[in-house]
Amino acid sequence: MEVKLASSRGFCVGVEGAIARAEAAIKEHGAGQVVSLGPVIHNEQVVRQLEEAGLDQSGDVETIDASKAVLIRSHGEPPETLKRARDRGLTIVDATCVLVKRAQDVVGQLHDEGYHVVMIGDPNHPEVRGVIGYAPKVTVIDQDTDLDEVLPSRGRLGILAQTTHSPEHVADMIAKILKHPYREAKIVNTLCLEVTRRQEAAIELAREVDVMFVLGGLHSANTRELARLCREAGCETHHLETWAQFEPVMVEGRQVAGVTAGASTPESVISTFARELEAL
């Protein structure tokens, strides 16, 4: 079978940095002495590798032994979490993505400037939960139905977005916000350029092939978004974590397959999948 790989795919700089910080912390403090507040990234294979190296990824600030270091994962944490960690005397290893840090700064800045802060994003995503903690009041919206119910009328809005959202979705939500009679809207672009490039490459590839495979954690927001965009481009799309989930029926009657991957997916997973697919 012919297999085409997306020109932009897999690990982004933020993910690479988070993994490197986690590995360095284990080396410095020792196996079993570093506790992460949840999975460092949304990829089961990488999570298992880090656990095998000695990282505990199921920590809670209130229960971590004071002799251990606490790792802030790539999605970041609200300031009150960091304060509780410092109050307990924990050593903090911060692996927050630099773009998430910027979004945290933007939220605080918009609030200080007197805007009602609006974040376009998934309210249940750890990045969003961490970012909105940097201002006393942030309204999170992600669907059309959120607009009338949660936004103040005739106010001054300061708008930003979850870093992994697609530019199309964010632009659509902003356009709908601006149809309301707000006095002012300040928009700060907090989207990750690397994620955007992966989305553009995936859409381009989806238009050239018979079937698309998007590789990455099933809980990864940016990977799910890739799969959604490929389907919207009109291509049959399968979101899988690894080759183990592949079924021959997925390529029945197909000649050319496209492969892309989320920002938390290792290149080894991508290359193995492509090699096995080509061998069919």
Image: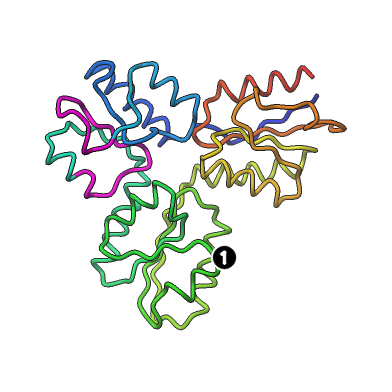
- Quadrant where the image shows the N terminus: top right
Observer-nearest of 43 and 175: 43
The amino acid type of the residue labelled 1 equals Asp
- Quadrant where the image shows the C terminus: top right
Overall secondary structure of the magenta section:
loop
Q: Position of residue 217 (x, y in %)?
A: 54, 34
In the rendered structure, does residue 70 fall within the stretch colored magenta? yes
Horizontally, residue 258 falls left or right of residue 201, namely: right
| Magenta residues (range) | 60-82
Instruction: Using a 10 Å C-alpha cutoff, classify the residue at mark 1 as few (fewer than 14 neighbours), some (14 to 19) or many (20 or more).
Output: few
Q: Where 227 sits versus 51, above or below?
A: below
In the rendered structure, does residue 172 fall within the stretch colored magenta? no
Identify the residue at horizontal 76%, vertical 49% (top origin).
234
Identify the residue at horizontal 46%, vertical 56% (top origin).
121
Q: How many marks?
A: 1
Horizontally, residue 49 falls left or right of residue 246, namely: left
Horizontally, residue 248 falls left or right of residue 40, namely: right
Observer-nearest of 36 and 191: 36
The residue where tag 1 is placed is 172
